[in-house]
Image (tube, rainbow, N blue to C red):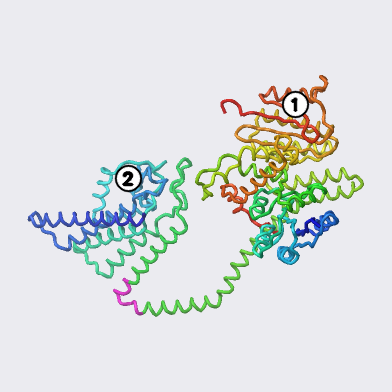
Amino acid sequence: MRRAERVDAVSVVAGLALLALGSLLLVSSTGGATFSAAVLGPAVAATLGAILLTAGLQPRPDDPVDAPSGTGLHRDPERRWLGGVCAGLAETLGVEPAIVRIAFALGVILGGLSVGLYALGWVLLPVRRSDGAAASRPARSILAVAFGVSLLALATLLAIRETGLWIGDAVVWPAALVAGGAALLWRRSRTEPAIATPAAPRPRRETRRETVSRTGVGVALVIAAALVFLEFTGVLGAARDALVAAFVAAAVLGVIFAPTIVRLVRSRDTERAERIRNQERAEMAAHLHDSVLQTLALLQQRADDPRAVTQLARHQERELRRWLSGRTPIDGAPRTLAAALEATVEDVERDHHVDVDLVMVGDAELTPRTDALLGAAREALVNAARHGGGGPVAVYAEAQDGRVEVDVRDRGPGFDPDAIPADRHGVRESILGRMARHGGRATIGPAPGGGTEVELVLEPEAGT
Amino acid sequence: MNEPTVAIVDDHALWRTGVRAELEGAFAVVGDAGTVDDAVELIVQAHPDVVLLDVHMPGGGGVEVLRRARAAGSPATFLALSVSDAAEDVIAVIRAGARGYVTKAIAPGELGDAVRRVHEGDAVFSPRLAGFVLDAFAGAPRPGASGGTGDPELDQLTPREREVLRLLARGYLYKEIAHRLKISPKTVEAHVSAVLRKLQLSNRHELSRWAAQHRVIDP
């Protein structure tokens, strides 16, 4: 995708450069004016540079933040000194406005060219404020930016040379390279927001890889410029000697200190891992101390009461399971039906000294209706604990597609539902009545194989 | 004569001793093992009919024992046993080939019964496993999701199978389910075996996910 873009940009640049060249040749051949190659050279370079720079500053289509706004050349009157041209340009380039302003000032001193450019910018550039969308800057193709700036610098230098100021090759080429490298290095890294407006959407952060490659290319360009300059001025030989010496020194130092450095880095990592591990161990120890160790102590105290021992063990088991599963906060209120039912079961187990086996399928949000269901289930559980002959109670709950069902079953002697006395508030009111009031139903009857079974059902609410 | 021979695989020595004491007399306990390597060796050497297999063990757990014993050609029947609440662990052992799953809280008499039943070829579902399976097969399978057998028969439970599982989850015995649904206990057993087969063969997204997520917990 990026390859395709680059090819695209290159073809556009080539086309426009040819167009510019063609029109210059056309003008010169019709005799309107004669341009020497010395004029054509800078002109073509400037065109290419400008276009590449624009291409490089285009937002990439795969950049979601920047895609809608785009950040072409614009003026920024909010931060203006004069017309906001420099501020806008700086924003587009991603450099400090001061750098652009100094560049323009230098341009004025050197020949007045930038005065015209500034005026042109003031008239032509659209106004965009440094807020909101404009604050987000596009991802740029670093190579296009570097080439663009280099070519612009080259064009400027060639033009200056034509005006008669003598500048040798030793200055022109390195200067062009330095311009490109500096453009990359001076760009503000996008690891910080471009503008500290709280409302502004955060610009796409430059990844570490991008930072490295941007800096790397910039440094390479500047070093290349230095080498070219040294080559032209003939001092490269001496510089090479110095470089070799420096490299050798660096290599020697590296060999000597590498193990130490590696060890330092490693020990820092180990220390950090150790610290995290210790923290986790301390947390786990604290929890086990508060729960499991306490329970074990209690178990020893009450060893003569098998029932209490079973209760304590079961309670601790459930609590530990909850903690291990991370489903419910230890001391928090249950947030779903499954957790609430688990808590209810646990309460009844503790208060009535009975074993309850809970199987839960699915889960549901807590609503007033499920609260009512939970209330009825608790009542059914208490009944099973009281009259179920002391055997284990089985609870099956299923919550699916809005339908909730809870079955409580004991293996006690069973009882005849029609024989429930009217004054037995528990069954009549707390189970049957409560379910009916909340649009559910409850069935109480003998279970196959003995015992009593209570079925509590909430059908899905109409309209949900 | 017809009583099956039994091997006990569990990394808790106390538990092994307890189960051994409980089963001895009714069954011939041919040995017990506390690690995956010992277990595989025991199973290959002593040819037990039924292996009581702990789901959680260091070094790969029950799944690893099953896989290696099967690779070594053992015809033993496996009954998974654990304190685990984690559906993915239990489902993983069943999918690896165990014929049933019971929790360690099972009443003493019922464990012997379960051993006998898996030996006879029945599937043994504890209420908790029935709950897990209902959860796993809840809703319609997503068509075409993550491979799938492309076999809707395998990826979905029939309404009757669902009903049987619900009653199992409610703690009903087979004969109570038969009574309630007015079918024979053999038919109940056939439904449960069919569910077990689906559990092992289906590529339903939920089951594959659980199998993939299954990781061994080393203490």
Q: Chain of mark 1?
A: A
Residue range in magenta is A228-237
Q: Name the residue at 44% across, 55% down.
A: A189
Work out whether disc 2 and disc 1 sit on a shared chain. Answer: yes
Relative to A172, does residue A135 appear above or below in the rendering?
A: above
Say which quadrant the N terminus of chain A sits in. Answer: bottom left
N-terminal label among 2 and 1: 2
Circle 2 residue: A74
Is residue B89 or residue B97 the one in the foreground?
Answer: B97
Query: Would residue A62 appear left or right of B169 to someone viewing this image?
Result: left
Does A27 appear in magenta?
A: no
Does A233 appear in magenta?
A: yes
Circle 1 residue: A431
Give amino acid for label 2: His
Q: Within 10 angstroms of label 2, few (less than 14), some, or many (20 or more) residues?
A: many
Task: Using the numbered discs, state the Cα–Cα distance from disc 2 to disc 1 in whole angstroms.
Answer: 73 Å
Q: Chain of mark 2?
A: A
Give amino acid for label 1: Ile
Q: Secondary structure at mark 1?
A: helix
Q: Residue furthest left?
A: A31
Query: Would residue B91 appear left or right of A389 to someone viewing this image?
Result: left
Measuring from the top left, give residue B7's x and y in whole percent: 77, 59
Q: Nearer the viewer, mark 2 or mark 1?
A: 1
